[in-house]
Image (cartoon, rainbow, N blue to C red):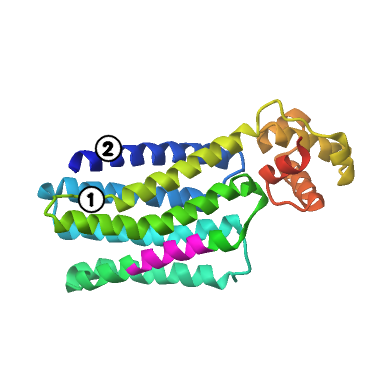
Amino acid sequence: MEVLEIILLILAYSLIIIALFLEVICYKKNIETLETIYFTISLLLLIVALTVTYFFRPFNHSDNTNIFILLAMILVALTTPLHILEERRHTIKPIFRKVLIAFSGVLTILVIAGHFTKILNVLQYVVALFLGISVVLSMILIRTTKPKVNIAHREKIERYIAIAVLIMIPLSLLTNYAVDLNGINTKIGFTLPLIFIVLAGSKLWSDIERLSLFKPKNTVKEQNLINYSLTNREKEIALLLIKGNTYKHISEQLFISIPTVKTHVSNIYRKCKINNRIELISLLSN
């Protein structure tokens, strides 16, 4: 069983690190959000905490490592809905984000204080419940809302993943319970590594698809540019944006300042009724 656990962990680590690397590249190209990067980092921190705790317990104080796990779980519970909300079309008010952040902050303080007040055992159940509710509600949100234009290309896989996670959680927990019942020693279990693999794998595939949009083969229909009443300068900048140029590169090529580039880009987005570069590519490219 330990061999299978190690294999799952190695696979999870590999996918998460690669996904994080591609997300940073996509963010620099203005086609990824910080919320998604924070989410992936929180997954990485959680799996690191689990690995350190369960495989190197003899070399660590269990209370300290348990706190590390709980804090990482709170971070995952916070970043999961935040990054889902950023990618979906919904009517949830901004106050929800503030309440979620505030609750996570309070829970974080309680966990740290719990180390000194000896209430960590109770807080473990609270944090686990918070994480479970956060993940389930996020998956339900995926199933009941439409994606924004910039992730519309992975709508089907998002919905399948939501179903898989909702099914995987109870099945994996039952499997872990059966293993423990039969006296088979497992250190980390299979639930979280499997979920990490599914989530990281989907993000990895999504970012590869996004980056593929910047290939030179993409062309823009002249009629599409005319339809949105773009000026000649805005057309130039739109073409450069689609080719993957940064604001700095655009300013250097057109001999204009970066603030001027930003103003033109804002006008382009406003006229096209979009919010970012990936939506512009989807709208104007063949």
Position of residue 185 in the picture relative to residue 96 (left or right): left
**Residue 4 highlighted magenta (yes or no):** no
Quadrant assignment, res 5? top left
Q: Amino acid at mark 1?
A: Ile
Helix or strand or loop: what does disc 2 sit on? helix
Look at the image and give the residue range highlighted in magenta: 129-140
Q: Nearer the viewer, residue 193 or 101?
A: 193
Q: Could you tell me which quadrant the C terminus lies in?
A: top right
Q: How far across and how far down the image is residue 78, in percent?
A: 43, 62
The answer to whether residue 24 of the structure is visible from this angle is no
User: In the figure, 57 relative to 143: above or below?
Assistant: above
Image label count = 2
User: In the figure, 78 relative to 247: above or below?
Assistant: below
Q: Label 1 crowding class (10 Å Cα cut-off): few <14, some 14-19, many 20+?
A: some
**Residue occupying the point 51% across, 63% down:** 140
The answer to whether residue 217 of the structure is visible from this angle is yes
Q: Nearer the viewer, residue 156 or 51?
A: 156
Q: Amino acid at mark 2?
A: Ile
Q: Which residue is mark 2?
A: 7
**Residue occupying the point 13% across, 55% down:** 182
Rendered image: mark on residue 188: 1
**Residue occupying the point 70% across, 31% down:** 243
Position of residue 50 in the picture relative to residue 86 (left or right): left
Q: What is the chief secondary structure element of the magenta stretch?
A: helix
